Amino acid sequence: MGLIPYKNEPYLDWADESNQRAMRRALEEVEGSLGKSYPLIIGGKRVETDDEIESVNPSKPSQVVGRTGRATEREADMALETATSTFQYWSKTAPEARARILLRAAASMRRRKFEMLAWEVHEGGKPWAEADAQVAEAIDFLEYYAREMLRLKDGVDIYSVPGEESRYFYQPMGVGVIIAPWNFPTAILTGMSSAAIVTGNTIVMKPSEYTSVIGAKVAEIFEEAGLPPGVLSFCPGYGSEIGDYLVRDARTRFVSFTGSVATGLRINELAARQIENQGWIKRVIVETGGKDAMIIDDSADLDAAADDIVKSAYGYSGQKCSAASRAILHHDIYDDVLKRVVEKAKALKVGIPEAADVKMGPVISEPQFEKVSGYIETGKSEGERVLGEDPGDSENGYFVPPTVFEVEPKARVAQEEIFGPILSVIDARDFDEALRIANDNPYGLTGGVYSKNRDHLERARHEFKAGNVYFNRTITGALVGVQPFGGFGLSGTDSKAGGPDYLPLHMLARTVVERF
Ligand code: NAP
């Protein structure tokens, strides 16, 4: 296939009036389609269920964004059966043909970009730029994994001994269960699904209950791209109702999961148990949470550091696994940076993200609102709140203001993943202590250092316990193909989505040796 070289999908320029107009139009059009129902899709057929999942707008919880089917074990069984039979055919489909489907899906998503952005605003509560970055990431996954499959389709080079030919190549694995979170409902769902599909597997795709309408849109896009029926079954349902069933089943060959550490560990445990008729050790790809830290030392550009702390901490209301939730400041510049962070965070416009100038929307749901509000109470008892106030009534949207606490490193708000707009600021005597504090946490997803000191940067390059370490910049927004993403420690299995090692996780490697 003659393809142009991979490059990241450019972000939209919101200073361009025509983009603003297109976005407003899309928001109106999508608003006109709110409240519709989206059934399951199994083997290409729409499957109605007895009950539905109702998805609401987190900025206006009384507004129903849409309803999707709600799979029970019966439908989960149908989806696994369909995936099992379709695997016979799809696994033998040429890698080029599979890659072509991803490229077509990328084209379709590009065509429908503003519409997808509008769903992100209504269902995910994302400000425009956050929604754009996320849909661009989804397109990147499709484009990148298509090319990766073409790179890997004939295997990779190994050595042979004289008189023999050794070949090393990959083959599809089987039925995959794809379980996604709500915080990147287009990008992560598309990324995990497309990697599994392009490598020749068939999948049961389960979106988060909070963003199941976006899940339906992603499924539609794969259909539009010409993905044959049965390769992807769209199977929304509550994790608590069908999750264990899908993971345990003997037909499941692998599980690709992104979400909380509690669910990830449960999946890991259940998948490890052998059950009757199971013919393999299930493979589990689990990517989970973070308690990501930014260290600012005394040589740093303090204003740029404060800017990037604020962007990393409050982008999408702190609901990114990569979000900065700890700022560890060298004692000598502590007061200065804290003051700048507070000023900049205070200036963020919080509101309903349908408006172009809103920089921070709500948190995703009532349970998330309650959880984050609870941590605000905890933080108040553990340290000093230097920015933020108690959240208002959640009936008018799940809004939580940007919040900053000054705390000790071992405070719960500085140790546990909150997943909201709450930043813990910690005083460190020197760089050694700052690095020790940063690493003293079971997670290890992203991290950053702001410094002009080469020794500090080189130490952090090797010693900062995180899968993704960034110097003198933000720590969020990993670019596909440029910043492969995945964590250490309790943050996951380090699968590095969007990187060169990702697709082989979805395949079986085969060594074939022929003696001449
Ligand atoms: P979650 O509660 O663990 O849910 C994730 C997915 O798992 C949802 O689809 C959920 O379904 C499903 N699920 C729930 N119980 C299950 C079970 N017993 N078996 C199988 N699946 C089950 O996480 P979340 O709140 O959606 O997402 C936020 C978390 O994801 C944060 O911890 C964040 O750090 C992490 N995250 C990590 C990355 C990364 O790359 N490392 C990226 C993004 C997010 P329901 O929606 O129906 O409950």
Image (cartoon, rainbow, N blue to C red):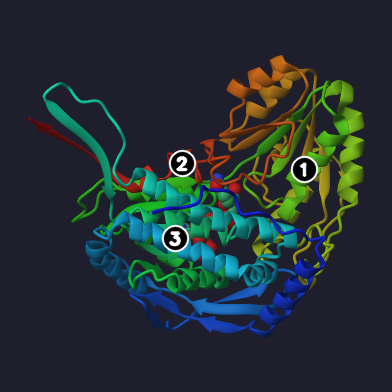
Residue at x 66% of width, y 69% of height: 114
Name the N-terminal-most of marks 3 and 2.
Answer: 3
Which of the two discs, 1 and 2, sits closer to the camera?
Answer: 2
- Bin the neighbour count of mark 1 within 10 Å (Cα to Cα): few under 14, some 14-19, many 20 and up: many
Residue at x 77% of width, y 24% of height: 451
Q: What residue type is labelled 1?
A: Leu
Residue 186 on image: x %, y %: 57, 62
Which of the two discs, 3 and 1, sits closer to the camera?
Answer: 3
Q: Which mark is residue 423?
A: 1
Residue 493 on image: x %, y %: 46, 39
Label 1 to label 2, Cα distance in Å?
27 Å
189 displayed left or right of 232: right
- Bin the neighbour count of mark 2 within 10 Å (Cα to Cα): few under 14, some 14-19, many 20 and up: many
Up-down relation of residue 325 to residue 420 (above or below): above
Residue 237 appears in the figure: no
Quadrant placement of the N terminus: bottom left
Work out whether residue 463 or residue 87 is closer to the camera in this orientation and state it.
Answer: 87
Name the N-terminal-most of marks 3 and 1.
Answer: 3
Q: Which mark is residue 102?
A: 3
- Bin the neighbour count of mark 3 within 10 Å (Cα to Cα): few under 14, some 14-19, many 20 and up: many
Res. 118 image quadrant: bottom right
Quadrant placement of the C terminus: top left
Q: What residue type is labelled 3?
A: Leu
Which of the two discs, 3 and 2, sits closer to the camera?
Answer: 3
Per the image, the residue denoted by label 2 is: 495
Residue 483 on image: x %, y %: 58, 40
105 displayed left or right of 315: left
Residue labelled 2 has its Cβ within 8 Å of some atom of ligand 1:
no
- Tag 3, which secondary structure? helix
Residue 256 on image: x %, y %: 42, 52
- Tag 1, which secondary structure? strand
Work out whether residue 511 or residue 22 is closer to the camera in this orientation and state it.
Answer: 22
